[in-house]
Amino acid sequence: MNSHNSYQHDKNAEIAYLEKLIVTFGTNSGLQNEEAIRNIHTRFRELEKKRSNVLRTVTQSEDGYYQLCLKVHDFLYHGIIGNAGQFRKINDPDGGDVYFGGINPWTMKNKFIGTKPELISLELYEAFSILFDDRYNPTEKSIRFYSEFVAIHPFYDANGRIGRYIVDTYLQSHRYYVDWQSINKKHGKFLRKLNYCHSVRAKYKQCLNQSDLEPIFDSKKAIYWKGIREKYIGYLLNFWNQFVEFIPLE
């Protein structure tokens, strides 16, 4: 598939998915789907231009960034889908579950499932707490957070986009810059490393959830998978470090 056809496929998939969300959650805009997509992209560019104002106003705390991700989603989707600025909910269709990462060619099932809706807030606060964990430097905090945020998948759409916006906002508050353009040139490699982290995270979470049933056996498994998870996060961090630069004061 050439780059033009690939772009067209992604664009068509984006339009089809937005149409599904509009049918499910409603809209008051009356926009055509392609126009709605353009509006979302335009709004995201506007957000990027307003970053200096966001940096001045966002509270540097777990709750500050928690509220920011809701505000960003609302800004992007207000008037386009009816659940703008809201996380997935258990009373949504299909229990609010969402799948991502494409189809596993071996199992023919979706690769990943986002966090259950009833646990989204809890896991998001845990993810945002990473940004304030003194064990890590800002660069490591940012990619650990991003990996968690995407795995949680709190919204039906724009999780990667919102995660990147928060990462950029956080890093710029510490005078760091992410070269996303260069990352995008190696998107496949970045995605594979991210997906490995998602896979071992799922194994680790599964062991934690089962530890009440078989505490000794599953606790040992959880420790094992935690170690594997740290290894793959290390691989992701090594890749990430190539594209994050410190911005010195002039």
Image (tube, rainbow, N blue to C red):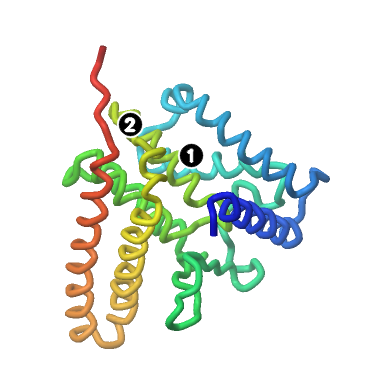
172 vs 249: above or below: below
Task: Identify the residue at horizontal 34%, vertical 76% (top origin).
Answer: 206
Quarter of the image with the N terminus in it: bottom right
Q: Is residue 18 visible?
A: yes
In the image, 52: left or right of 247?
right
Residue 126 seen by the camera: no
Residue 239 is labelled as none
In the foreground, 91 or 159:
159
Q: Element under label 2?
A: strand
Name which residue type carries label 2: Tyr
Q: How many marks?
A: 2
Q: Which residue is mark 2?
A: 177
* Residue 176, image x, y percentages: 29, 30
Query: What residue sits 45% from the left and 56% below the top?
Result: 121
Label 1 packing within 10 angstroms: few (<14), some (14-19), many (20+) = many
* Residue positioned 52% across, 25% down in the render: 49
Task: Indicate the amino acid at tag 1.
Answer: Leu
Q: Which residue is mark 1?
A: 68
Q: Are marks 2 and 1 in contact (CB under 8 Å)?
A: no
Q: Between label 2 and label 1, give the one nearer the viewer.
A: 2
Which residue is at the far top?
250
| Residue 162 pos. (x, y %) | 49, 45
Label 2 crowding class (10 Å Cα cut-off): few <14, some 14-19, many 20+?
some
Q: Is residue 97 above or below residue 25?
A: below
| Near-viewer residue (9 or 85) | 9
Residue at 68% x, 38% y: name it: 39
